[in-house]
Amino acid sequence: MSSAASRTAAGPVGGRRLGYALIAPTIAVLLAITAFPLAYNVWNSFHRVKLLDPGSHPLTGLSNYRTLVTSSAFHATFVRTVGYTVVSVAIELAVGLGLALIVHRAFAGRGLVRAAILIPWAVPTVVSAMSWKTMFDPSSGFVDYLLRLFHLPGAHTTWLAHTWTAWAAVLVADAWKNTPFMAILLLAGLQVIPTDVYEAATVDGATAWQTFRRITLPLLTPALLVALIFRTLSAFLIFDVIYIMTGGGPGSSTETLSYVNWRAFLVDTDFGYGGAVSVSLVVMALAIAFVYLRVLRPEET
């Protein structure tokens, strides 16, 4: 009896040890890939490191961070990035949730529709951004053609040459690419909700809105949390679509924090300031994830 009890007590401990042993190689590889660049960026952020000025790299303390937080250009870029993140994630969440609810229902050809939804997400970002850049071209793109065909406002607009229209084009391109990702994550969450709770709600006379608000949304919270964390961080760190479609222009009106980081490293070759921007981005990303976990974490029962 005592030996059986000891085996039962030791079982979970042994299982945890086995789990740690199985994931240890993966953790070691991830640390080897990410730990050095992160530590190198932290070191750079406290030193003066410029590739065009080789030699010693004197310690500057918080000078790079002071430059960062006192820069009006950085403040403007931060506001643009946050604004874009909020708008894009809100749109993608609403459209993605709608798509997930639609393809969750049984109808003829549902499998084909689900596969078609994944096509934009499967297209490489470079290809997607270049395609949308061409489509927004006023002389050869179909956007201007459709606007003229249906006599809608915006025809003959040079979309990428003006601040707000450039942001609109970037938003459309990014939403087209990433909304399917949001939809698939939310669809996975919908599929694990037991059907009997919906049957009970129908018996109790709940309306469709009451069922959605009181059953679907609460039970979908874990999937919502995952989808929002991934998409918010991806939108907050957006670079490739901006780089390809607008190049940060017109002027610097569509530059984001990641674009500023790229420019600091590869254009200005200022690894000290670039390191400070990189470390700041990591801290901001962790803060975003922490807020989501605190706000949307499922209540413990």
Image: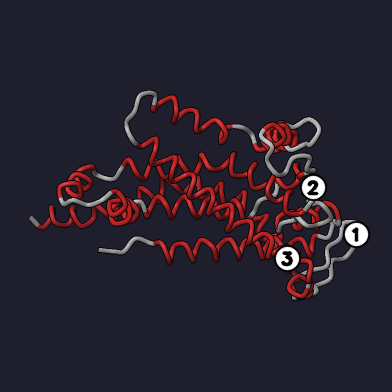
Is 234 placed left or right of 118 in the picture? Answer: right
Which-is-in-front pick, marks 3 and 2? 2
Please say if 81 is above or below 246: below
Q: Can residue 181 be seen in this view?
A: yes
Residue 225: x and y in percent read 43, 55
Which of 167 and 29 lies nearest the eye of the viewer? Answer: 167
Residue 88: x and y in percent read 58, 52
Q: What residue type is labelled 2?
A: Gly
Q: Earlier in the sequence, mark 3 or mark 2?
A: 2
Q: Is residue 126 visible?
A: no
Is 208 placed left or right of 170 in the picture? Answer: left
Where does label 2 land, which residue? 247
Which of 40 and 165 lies nearest the eye of the viewer? Answer: 165
- As measured in the structure, the alpha-carbon distance from the residue carrying label 1 to the one carrying label 2 is 29 Å
Q: Earlier in the sequence, mark 1 or mark 2?
A: 1
Q: Quadrant of residue 78?
A: bottom right
Residue 86: x and y in percent read 58, 58
User: Which residue corresponds to the image point at 29% horizontal and 64% vertical from the top-left?
Assistant: 300
Q: Which residue lies furthest to the right in this view?
A: 53
* Residue density around tag 2, few if under 14, some if 14–19, many if 20 or more, within 10 Å: some
Q: Which mark is residue 276?
A: 3
Q: What residue type is labelled 1?
A: Pro
Query: In terms of secondary structure, where does tag 2 sit?
Result: loop
* Residue density around tag 1, few if under 14, some if 14–19, many if 20 or more, within 10 Å: few
User: Which residue corresponds to the image point at 34% horizontal and 60% vertical from the top-left?
Assistant: 298
Q: Quadrant of residue 111?
A: top left
Where does label 1 land, which residue? 54
Q: Earlier in the sequence, mark 3 or mark 1?
A: 1
Q: Which amino acid does label 3 sit on?
A: Ala
Is 290 placed left or right of 277 in the picture? Answer: left
